[in-house]
Amino acid sequence: MASHQEVVRGLNVEKYMGRWYETALFPSFFQPKNGVDTRATYTLRPDGNFSVLNEVWVNGRRKSISGIAYKADPRSDEAKLKVKFRIPPDLPFVPVVGDYWVLYVDDGYQNAVVGHPTRRFLWDKFLP
């Protein structure tokens, strides 16, 4: 059963690009339980999509995964995105696609809340 959540409309993708730091989250299976200093870096691509680099430090070592984010419906102004990663990162033939919804972003694009339509995942990211 799908839930209805309000999402940002008219997201300024250029302003959204950059490095975002995770400040709170609901635990999820794909993030290490002892990970710290989690961050995501978004870079605009010429095709209008953007590159994603997710990083976390576990026991003093950096772990990362990269992917591509794109609008779920290119005709919509809603900030409902899909993110495609390769799992594991060094095997390019096993893509995993997930939902990435921007639920809130402040006027200065300094704080955002990102979630998932099932409400199982919710991230609050802070851009310094």
Image (spheres, helix red, strand yellow):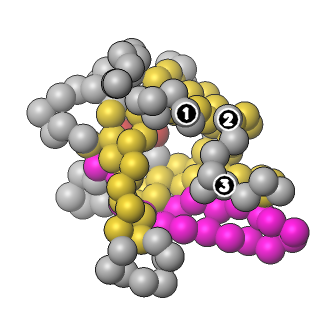
Q: In this orientation, which residue lies closer to the viewer: 27 or 110? A: 27
Q: Quadrant of the N terminus?
A: top left
Q: Which residue is mark 3?
A: 31
Q: Is 1 within the magenta? A: no
Q: What amino acid is at disc 1?
A: Arg
Q: Is residue 95 visible?
A: yes
Q: Secondary structure at mark 3?
A: loop
Query: Distance of mark 1 from mark 3, alpha carbons?
Result: 13 Å
Q: Residue at x 18, y 37 (%)?
A: 73
Q: Position of residue 57 (x, y in %)?
A: 77, 64
Quadrant location of the C terminus in the rendered image? top right
Of the residues under marks 1 and 3, which one precedes in the sequence? 3
Q: Which residue is mark 1?
A: 120
> Which of the two residues, 80 or 127, is positioned nearer the viewer here?
80
Percent x, y of residue 103: 46, 24
At a point 42% along the width and 71% down the height, the residue shown is 86
99 is higher (above) or lower (below) than 105: below
Q: Amino acid at mark 2?
A: Phe
Cα separation, mark 3 vs mark 2, equals 10 Å
Which residue matches tag 2? 26
The picture quadrant where one finds residue 102 is: top left
Q: Quadrant of residue 97?
A: bottom left
**In this rendering, would 115 be left or right of 11?**
right
Tell me the crowding category of disc 2: few under 14, some 14 to 19, or many 20 or more residues within 10 angstroms, Cα based.
few
Q: Indicate which disc, 3 or 2, sits on the residue closer to the N terminus.
A: 2
> Dot 1 lies on which element?
loop
Specify the segment rendered in magenta.
53-70
Residue placed furthest toward the bottom: 90
Of the residues shown, which amino acid type is indicated by label 3? Gln
